[in-house]
Image (cartoon, rainbow, N blue to C red):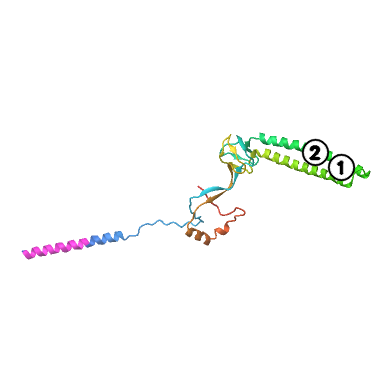
Amino acid sequence: MMKNTNKTIIMLAVCAIICGCSDDGKKGNIAMQPEEVAVALPIVKPIEEWDDYTARIEAAKSVEIRARVSGYLTKINFSEGQMVKEGDLLFIIDPRPYEAKVMSAKAKIKEVEARLALAKSNVARAENMYKSTVISKEELDTRRAELLAQEASLASAKAELRDAELNLEFTHIIAPVSGRVSEAMLDEGNLVTADSSLLTTIEKNDIVQAYFEASERDIVGYDEIGLFGKIDQKSLWGPKWSFV
């Protein structure tokens, strides 16, 4: 009876193994079936490579405004950050001392012109007297020398008048270029020193320059693709850049 029981257990085990193998085979056949795959063709189009840098933007040209004459600042004729045009009035320095110098130079010219007229008359009389042998040649030469001296004095007086008029004109400080003006460095009432005191700055922002630092690896790469050869500094032309 024990033998029959062992045979029965062995047969059941064999059947279980055969059934298990049969199930695994079915499962394996199901797993190896091909699945559906979506296929898409690649898109071909030109692309642009970009490198990002942190840059400092500055105007290509800027002008420091300084006074050509000394005096007290009486008027500021612009607002900070305002766009100004070439020839616009920016500052006024007290013109009264320079107006007085102009008047003095004009008076000196009239004085010299009077002496010059007298010297011309003296030369004319001296020439007639010399023809009549009344005076010597030396006396005639003296009169002529006096005339030349007065002519030189008149030229000097006119130059002084021109200098005084220029100084008076410089009391009105105008914009030498068009651009954006910065703040006024001095307030009204302060003393301005000629060629020394900085009054303001004008920047021409129609052309700007970007300053940034690039790695040596990037620079070598740009050189290899010929980027630097595409930049023309004279005509200010080159590859397109994007600033954010």
Task: Report the predominant secondary structure element of the magenta stretch.
Answer: helix
The boundaries of the magenta stretch are 2-20
Residue 136 as seen in the image, left or right of residue 54: right
Residue annotated with mark 1: 123
Q: Locate residue 159: give its quadrant.
A: top right
Residue 139 x, y percent position in the rendering = 87, 45
Amino acid type at circle 1 is: Val
The extreme left residue here reads: 1
Per the image, is 66 magenta?
A: no
Residue at 17% from the left image edge and 62% from the top image edge:
15
Q: Is residue 114 visible?
A: yes
Q: Amino acid at mark 2?
A: Glu
Determine the residue positioned at 7% across, 65% down: 3
Q: Which residue is mark 2?
A: 113
Residue density around tag 1, few if under 14, some if 14–19, many if 20 or more, within 10 Å: many
Left or right? Give the position of 233 relative to 7.
right
Is there CB contact under 8 Å for labels 1 and 2? no
